[in-house]
Image (cartoon, grey):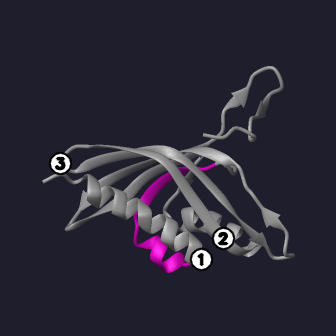
Amino acid sequence: MTLEPEIRQHIGKIVEGLRAKDLDALRKLYAPDVVSYDVEPPLQHVGVDAKLKNWAKVFALFDEVDYELRDLTVLLDTDLAVGHGFGRVSGTLRDGTAANGMWVRATFVLRKAGDGWVIVHDQASVPFDFATGKGVTDLEP
C-alpha cells in the first residue's frame, strides 16, 4: 500500500483550511516546531504560531480566499515525505477587488506522527531576477 494518497490528502487539507479561513484546522496540519520559509519576511518563521500569523494576515486582507495547488509531486519514504508544486492565493479583497495573486513555488516536508502526518517545513518562493534585484511574480505554471 502506498502512502502517497495520505500525503496528498494532508496537503489538500491546507487548501480546505485556507478556503474556509480556518486557522484551527490549519494548526492541526503543522508540527508545533514547523520551520517556514515564506515569501514574506523574515527569512524564516519558526513555530506553528508564526506560520499561522502569516495566514491570519492573508485572512485579514481577503473577504474570500481561494488557494490553488498545481503539479504536485510527492516523494516519500516510510516516515518522511516531500511534496512540491506551484501554489497561488487569490480571491476577493475586503474592498471587493478581485485579486488573482501570483504563482509561487511550493514545497512541503512532512513527518509521520502517530497515525498521521505533520508538516515540519514548508517554503513558498518566487524566482529572482539578478539584473533587477527583484522577485519575478508574473510567471505561470
Circles 1 and 2: CB atoms closer than 8 Å: yes
Tag 3 residue? 78
Q: Give the range drawn in magenta.
A: 22-38
Mark 1: few/some/many CA within 10 Å (<14, 14-19, 20+): many
Mark 2: few/some/many CA within 10 Å (<14, 14-19, 20+): many
Tag 2 residue? 65
- Marks 1/2: CA–CA distance: 7 Å
Q: Which of marks 1 and 2 is nearer the N terminus?
A: 1
Circles 1 and 3: CB atoms closer than 8 Å: no
Left or right: residue 44 compared with residue 95: left
Q: Position of residue 13 (x, y in %)?
A: 43, 68
- Element assignment for label 1: loop
Can residue 67 be seen at all in this image of the molecule?
yes
55 or 138: nearer the viewer: 138
Q: In this view, does 112 lie above or below 92?
A: above
Place residue 74 in its image quadrant.
top left
Left or right: residue 29 compared with residue 113: right
Front disc: 1 or 2 = 2
Tag 1 residue? 21
